Amino acid sequence: MSSKASRENLTVRALVSSTEAEIIIGDRHANIHRVQEETGVYAGVSEAVRGVKDQILAVTGTVEGVVKAFSLVAYHLASLRVEPTDSSSESPLSPHPPTKLRILMPHRILPDVVGRDGKKIKAIQDSTGASLGVTGKMLLRSTECLVAVHGSPEAIGKAVEQIVMSVPKDSGFGKGTILFKPGTGDRERRARLSSEGRRRRGYLVTNAWCGPSSSPQPLSSEKTQTSAPPVLETRKMSIPEDMVGYVLGRNRSNLAWIRRTARAKINLASQPTQKKGDDAERVLKIVGTTLAVETAISLIAKRVERARRLRAGGWTGSRQGSQAREDEDEEQG
């Protein structure tokens, strides 16, 4: 893996059950925090939706960080699958049992992973020891499909690396992808049935997401509004306290640019977390569609990573230049 490729940020998503999501997050978010601290990535799980059995795990960072993060996630899942046995027969060095992760992948890059006559995917299996199962059918209302990776945590991490590295750089792992949202079909069906029920009663509620001020509007034979509002999700991410200024920019210009570009609402906590010194963090709350949230996280992660590189090169201030200047510097770098 080239050093340049390993520094570039990308987002890899996985479909996890609600039970797996609880394990990945851990008690008081201990597991997800450990993953972030040990790998330098930003990892988050979408909020659980009532009646929907799956959630989305999204990991944003360098290739190296993402690979290590998925290995740790698989480790947590495998650890919970170990059946209790007689303590006298247990060995702390015994390997963890195999587990499975369902990686979400853009359908258009599937041929790059599978290869001609399946040769590429077979090579990945042979070199990593993991088993890969590909579902070519796109998931509902998306252009993503599933690649199931089954094996030990180490094998899963290696397989994820091979999958990511097999995608041509100009294709981009998530560029132009319609992201899958668990339960989309169920929510649309419920919204349609609810709309039909209101229509039968002689009125249609518009601007239903605007709060109590919304009032029933009489139906018009000429025009009715039946489309459901976009489904929003909320994600929280933490950034180092000493890099807050770099993310915000002068007069918060950089944060405003990220909001406009991602089309997401981003709020910064007024106070850092209870951690002290170099471990102090500030929490960002991001609200928007799945695509908007993923875009915002990627842009923020990119700025933090650039700040770390500048700091490693001797920069010690709280640089707050404009986003346009940052983009120019990125191109020159």
Image (cartoon, helix red, strand yellow):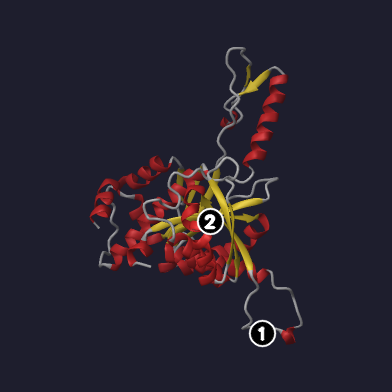
**Reading the chain from its start, which is encountered first: label 1 or label 2?**
2
SS of the residue under disc 2? strand
Which residue occupies 36% across, 52% down? 170
Residue 91's label in the rendered image is: 1
How far apart are the two marked residues, 1 and 2, measured between alpha carbons?
Answer: 32 Å
* 69 left or right, relative to 200: left
Residue 56, x across and y down, in percent: 58, 52
Residue extending furthest toward the front: 117
Instruction: Indicate the amino acid at tag 1.
Output: Ser
Q: Is residue 148 visible?
A: yes
Quadrant of the frame with the N terminus: bottom left
**Relative to residue 225, is residue 114 depicted above or below?**
below
The image quadrant of residue 276 is bottom left
Q: Nearer the viewer, residue 242 or 6?
A: 6
SS of the residue under disc 1? loop
Residue extending furthest toward the right: 86
Check disc 2 and report the residue beneath it: 44
Residue 179, x across and y down, in percent: 52, 45
Q: Nearer the viewer, residue 14 or 220?
A: 14
Residue 113, x across and y down, in percent: 49, 58
**Relative to residue 72, is residue 148 depicted above or below?**
above
Residue 24, x across and y down, in percent: 60, 62
**Relative to residue 290, is residue 146 depicted above or below?**
below
Q: Nearer the viewer, residue 34 or 291?
A: 291
